[in-house]
Image (tube, grey):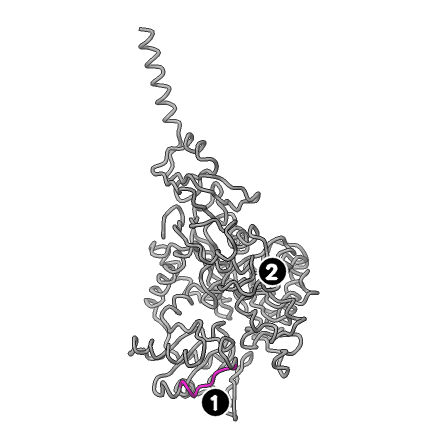
Amino acid sequence: MKCLSLLLFTLSMLLAGCSFKEKADLLVTNTRVYTADSSFSTATAFVIKEGKFLAVGQASALAEKYDPVSTVDLAGKPVYPGFYDPHSHFLGLGQVLDQADLVGAASYDEVIERLKTFHNAHPDVMWLTGRGWDQNDWPEQVFPTKEKLDAAFPTVPVALMRVDGHALLVNSKALRLAQVTAGSKLAGGEVMLANNQPTGVLVDNAMQLIKRVIPQPTVADKARMLLNAQKACVALGLTTVSDAGISPDEIKLIDSLHKARKLKIRDYAMISLGEPNMDYFLKRGPFQTERLTVRSFKLYADGALGSRGACLRKPYSDRPETTGFLLLSPAELERVTKLLYASNFQANTHCIGDSANHLMLDLYGKLLKGKNDRRWRIEHAQVVSPEDVWLFGRYSIIPSVQPTHATSDMYWATDRLGPIRVKGAYAFKDLMNQNAMIAFGSDFPVEAVNPLFGFHAAVARQDAKNFPPGGFQMENAVDRKSALLAMTRWAAYACFEDQLRGSIAPGKQADFVILDRDIMFAPANQLRQTKVLQTWIGGERVY
């Protein structure tokens, strides 16, 4: 009888032990987890419940404590927080996927051939559009003119966006439809002329003269574009992207696709600057859902270095008659930043040239006055005078940069800036040191979507062919730990989302990516070959 009682007691205790295990949805084990938390700790397993990380630690301990519905053994493959792109153009990517791809075209003739191929496949388009040409990649390295477009497409209007999004190449048909002439002008832009006639190239604000007559995609078109963009992004490990300048209607569309569970990827949307947009959102204030954050405005101070629209303090070395230009007047930029300071919105200002950066750091500083938690950002911070760098730390201004810009521009940046001034360009380490933080994005579709290209560019300062030997201006390379944080937790912080995601920690949204190799140790020349095996958002596998 005593033996039976002892047996029953033992069984009851075992059953009780099982019942004490906490229920969970998923246990991920046999991996190396880079948590990107405050101590940059690693683990071998984690548990997910209801779309959030429940626990992170050692596999044996978690297996004893939790009863998961399913278990995934990763056979040693590494896990990282979901990659986060704090400066991109998500809707823009979807739009580009509908156009002729001109990225990497080695000559103007190749651009024409790609357009012919695209037009043959899409003969019914009302306008022939494309993006990605870069005259700096061509043997002659000068802006193209409309004559070759006219010869190839005399009856179809053509509009081709430069790779940086700051210059447009069009044919005569497009110029006629838009009624653009030698006398057409728009502040903050340029209609380029030769023999007192438009060449077909329009820079920065002048592009609006053409854009206003190009048929716009419908809401259904934009929804399809967003879903196409999502497919491309999650395949590359991105779990949060951004839209650096979109309209209220586009924000509503993204929100509706989230609510319909069609759009899974998270989006940090910056509102395009404009009086109607400011009136609409300043009255309502910021808002945040599980997958969408709207609490910033996108401002443009100047244009791009490649099209010489970046505003410099001294003339361009390769075109001494110009210093570039501002897209908005200093008075207008000051007025807008004052309105944003009086609200709860973040100011995110596009600044490429050292004059634009100098101006905005001064305007920000007059309002912010000292250390703060407003998290105002300078987007790109591409050419910064050495004497201005410290102001990022003085006013807690976050540099939001794109490492691949350095490795795309390095072939001609010295021509634009000269050998001395170029040393203040793409100075990621110097900028990071001001606040012990920096945010890394891609600016896609200006650059490639793949965030690992940015990781490689940041740590090796080399292009896809591992050029140049030894790296470009290696004094401003960053270490791998900082590079990973800049595309995870620090990026989330720059978007007021660090309490929600950006690291693998209990209570945070279960966004993570599994790679085929450990980017913290893989040889630098192999980083761009890294493959994404799986992408998870909110505990759901999306790739």
Q: Is residue 195 magenta?
A: no
Q: Which residue is mark 2?
A: 428
Q: Residue furthest top?
A: 1
In the rendering, at what x and y percent does residue 396 appear?
A: 63, 56
What number of labels is visible? 2
Q: Amino acid at mark 2?
A: Phe
Magenta stretch: dominant secondary structure: loop
Q: Is 232 left or right of 383, judged from the image as shown? A: left
Task: Evaluate whether residue 399 shows in this view.
Answer: yes
Q: Who's the residue at 62% across and 64% down the image?
A: 473
Residue 290 or residue 431, whichever sits in front: 431
Q: Is residue 402 visible?
A: no
Disc 2/disc 1 C-alpha distance (Å): 42 Å
From the viewer's perspective, is 236 left or right of 278?
left
The relative height of residue 520 versus residue 376 in the rendered view (above or below) is above
* Residue shown at 51% from the left, 64% from the top: 463
Residue at label 1? 181
Give coordinates of residue 400: x percent, y percent: 56, 61
Image coords of residue 515 (percent x, y): 43, 50
Q: Nearer the viewer, residue 513 or 11?
A: 513
Specify start and end residues of the magenta stretch as a single range.
Answer: 142-149
146 within the magenta span: yes
Sequence-earlier tag: 2 or 1: 1
Tag 2 and tag 1, C-beta contact below 8 Å: no
User: For the residue marked with disc 1, what is the amino acid?
Assistant: Thr
Residue 68 horizontal side relative to residue 399, left or right: left
- Across and down, in percent, residue 182 comes to 50, 90
Q: Residue furthest front?
A: 469
